[in-house]
Amino acid sequence: MTARYWTRLGLSLARVVAAGLVGSFVTALGVYIYLLDKRPDLSVWHVADLDEEFTADSGISDFGQYLALEERLFTQLDRLVYDQVPVGPENAINRYSRGSLSDPDRWPLNWNRSFELGHEQPTAGVLLLHGLSDSPYSLRTLGETLQQAGASVLGLRIPGHGTAPSGLVETRWQDMAAAVRLAARHVRDAVGDRPLYLVGYSNGGALAVEYALQTLEDPSLPKASGLVLLSPEIGVSSVAALAVWQGRLGHLLGLEKLAWNVLLPEYDPFKYGSFAVNAGDLAYRLTAHIQQQLGALQQRDRLADLPPILAFQSSVDATVTASALVANLFDRLPPADHELVLFDINRRAEVGSLLAEDPRTVFGPLLAKDTRSFDLTLVTNENPESNRAVALTTAIGERSPGAATYLDDWPADVY
């Protein structure tokens, strides 16, 4: 047998294997699409076209206009969603059934809307930015506490939120960022030259970082005196970049259900149960944009101009990981008045055996790193036999913490 024979045989086998792989992929894709399309039918809150929602192209120049548009949006929500959902026992916990146990209007204030907690003589202004699929409700208690401490507070309803899950099918991160700029200017006008702080949770944390970075490029934006980030969405899995193709494939095939990662009943008055594919995609695009901003500003030595950043993060958060927060944000910052507060597990609860990885693998290397450019505070047990929590702060350049700050006991239901 000649070399030519073996070459032809090898090519033939390669074609067979390639055809098999392609066939397997097409079959798997077909099954995946079939299963996605066999999910429950979409409801009116999944398909309502709420075109009164704010976008970066709305032509709105101040926050008063934003609130006026928000009022029209909720009027449209009543007409397109609430008016279409029957009232009765079968919808007793449906948030879109008027008078149900989950109807947001059962509360004195509908916390799905933007809210302001003003102060006659504010010591500071605070802009609250909620998370993805959440509403201003999620930060209301913090807002009320800050108002009592003397701050003038604005809780922004970020575009796509507080209405119906369909609101996140088309919203872009640029629309959200544009709303943050309007809101920041409004808070600055309300408090004058007093400090302005941005507090962001999850996706709101990413928007706060994006805003602070943008102020270094755009001097017309009011500068923040500090950022407070709660589990900020700084690192998102690269797999999220593929999510958009599911939605595009569904659009191509006319299968609307493919625009959704999760389809669940809507019983929470202030948070969506269903999750649009586009929401994951915009989160990925926003975090990628932030990395581009950081890289460009780092090359020009501008990151030293950022305001102090205080971040709170669980060491066992699987959605927003502490390691991603450090690698994608804190490690890129020059030494300054920044601090990361990490929450350990409750060591006395003995839940470590239930975890795939001990959180010490996350914060251990951070504590040992003497080139760290930020303060690191670990909230953990006083000792494994004690319920008492302590805060151990290791300053920049140090490898061991200073004196412990004693806190309350771990709550009985927190592990």
Image (cartoon, grey):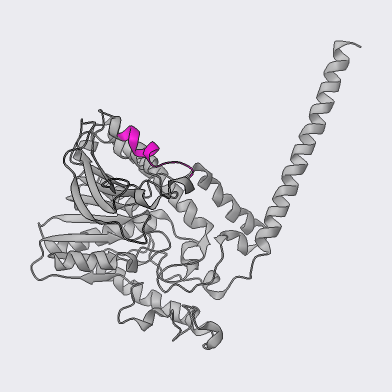
Q: Tell me the quarter of the picture where residue 14 sits.
A: top right
Task: Please indicate whether residue 398 sits to the left or right of residue 318 in the image.
Answer: left
Residue lying farthest to the bottom in this orientation: 88
Q: In this rendering, would 124 be left or right of 338?
A: left
Q: Nearer the viewer, residue 388 or 254?
A: 388
Q: Position of residue 135 (x, y in %)?
A: 37, 66
Nearest the camera: 98 or 383?
A: 383
Image quarter hosting the C terminus? bottom left
Residue 23 in the figure: left or right of residue 335: right
Reply above or below: 76 against 297: below
Residue at left 60%, top 70%? Answer: 42
Q: What residue range appears in magenta? A: 356-366
Q: Is residue 392 left or right of residue 255?
A: left
Q: Which x, y percent locates residue 268? A: 44, 72
Instruction: Give the percent coordinates (x, y) of residue 74.
Output: 39, 77
Which residue is painted at 48% across and 81% down in the image?
82
Q: Decide whether the magenta segment is chiefly helix, strand or loop.
A: helix
Q: At which x and y percent is residue 47?
A: 55, 70
Residue toward you, 55 or 15:
15
Compared to 19, does 248 lie above or below?
below
